Image: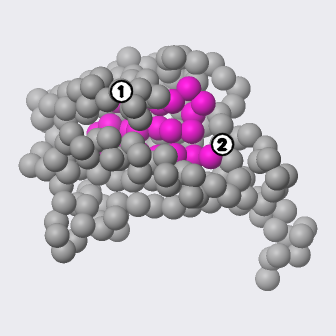
Amino acid sequence: MSVDSILNQNYVKWMDQTENGEDIVISSRIRLARNLHELPFPHLLDEEKGAEVLQLIQQVWEKDADHLKQVDFASLQGLSIMDRQILMEKHLISPEFSHSNSAYRGVLLNEEGSTCIMINEEDHIRIQCVLPGLSLDQCCQQAMALDDAFEAELDYAFDEKRGYLTACPTNVGTGLRASVMLHLPAIQFTGQAR
């Protein structure tokens, strides 16, 4: 498997039609934000500390034989502007992340594009799972399995009172965001808009 396969596909997993024909909920997404203990958040990283974060995460990826073997690594510096644009348009990386070609930023992607882990975006680790239809439980299970694989090897920035520490205060606590993409004309057409 390689990142090239996802770049050359016309679509990614979340674009698949749902099995039950649900037309209102297009996709579900779970995102987890994590940072490493005693290392500056990404917006404060210099080249040396950024490379250290990237190396620590890559070592866990290379070592894990279960959950992390389903994803492939690519350095943002090794991706062209067009490649980063494609990943952004497929909703796999953020717009801000797509504009960077820093040597200490990277991405871990699975072949179907349902799992993406951004390294040194706003947080050291941004795990996201995106699946078609209303699939929040399945997304959460996949994201948590990846998170567990990292947390077994890395010392996360965590506070007993506040929870997981993140670059943005609105993510402090669980570091989890859940969202669904809705087709609003379908809601109107079915009479569910009020």
Residue 71, image quadrant:
top left
Residue 65, image quadrant:
top left
Camera-side mark, 1 or 2:
1
Say whether residue 22 is left or right of residue 1: right
Q: Residue at x 57, y 39 (%)?
A: 114
Specify whether residue 118 is painted magenta.
Answer: yes
Expressed as whole percent of the image width and height from the top left, the position of residue 83 reads: 52, 23
Expressed as whole percent of the image width and height from the top left, the position of residue 84 reads: 49, 28
Image position of 176 with respect to 90: above or below: below
Residue 39, image quadrant:
top left
Q: CA distance from mark 1 to mark 2?
A: 25 Å
Q: Residue at x 89, y 70 (%)?
A: 190
Q: Identify residue type, mark 2.
A: Trp
| Residue 163: numbered disc | none
Which circle's residue, 1 or 2, is located before the other in the chain? 2
The residue to which callout 2 is attached is: 14
Expressed as whole percent of the image width and height from the top left, the position of residue 160 reads: 17, 70
Specify start and end residues of the magenta stretch as a single range: 106-131
Image position of 117 with respect to 28: above or below: above
